[in-house]
Amino acid sequence: MIIQKTNTKTNKIAHIVLFSSDLNLDYKKIIDYYSLRFQIEFVFRDAKQHWGLEDFMNITEIAVNNGANLATFMVNISHILQQDFNNDEMSVLDIKAHFHGLKYINEVFKLLPKFPDDILIKKIYSKITSIGAIHQCDIAA
């Protein structure tokens, strides 16, 4: 499919060529798919960079399908969590550091003979969940 764009001020003409292997695909669908291209690339970049898509060594179809779906699911979850945090600069690494800290705290609390008081718990959560983070998360434990 070829799209011709004309600048109304300069009358310059530009052509955009879009390709599809599906010859029966409607031109509107092709334009929609191309407009989603960068969003899809960003999802795969995040899945590879943050959620292990680049590192998994699966070879069976089911394992590859599960790994790819889990990594892209985690990208979606991390975007939702980024909206829940009060800091607009919160990164995926900050979120991962926060939840790693929560896991470590909960495991340590299981080892204690007596559960700490609420004030100490808040201080512990605040300190431990920020280890490894660039930006502080403000979310309830």
Image (cartoon, grey):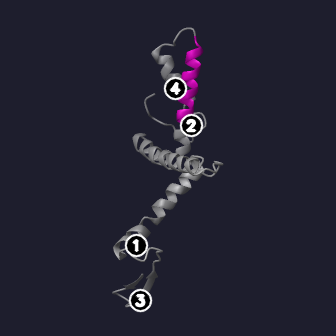
Q: Position of residue 6 (x, y in %)?
A: 37, 86
Q: Earlier in the sequence, mark 1 or mark 4?
A: 1
Q: Main secondary structure of the magenta part?
A: helix
Which dot, 4 or 2, sits closer to the camera?
A: 2
- Magenta stretch holds residue 129: no
Q: Is residue 102 magenta?
A: yes
Segment tinted magenta in the rendering: 98-112
Labelled pair 1, 4 in contact (Cβ < 8 Å): no
CA–CA distance between discs 3 and 2? 50 Å
Query: Relative to the observer, which residue lies in front, 26 or 73?
Result: 26
In the picture of the structure, the residue carrying the numbered disc 2 is: 97
Query: In the rendered image, is residue 135 in sight?
Result: no
Report which residue position mark 3 lands on.
13
> Is disc 1 placed on a helix, strand or loop?
helix
Q: Secondary structure at mark 2?
A: helix
- Secondary structure type for disc 3: strand
Marked residue nearer the N-terminal end (1 or 3): 3
Q: Is residue 109 above or below residue 27?
A: above
Q: Which residue is mark 1?
A: 30
Q: Name the residue tied to disc 4.
A: 125
Of the pair 138 and 107, the residue shown nearer to us:
107
Category of crowding for the residue at label 2, using alpha-carbon neighbours closer than 10 angstroms: few (below 14), some (14–19), many (at least 20): many
- How much space separates mark 1 and mark 4, taking CA atoms? 49 Å
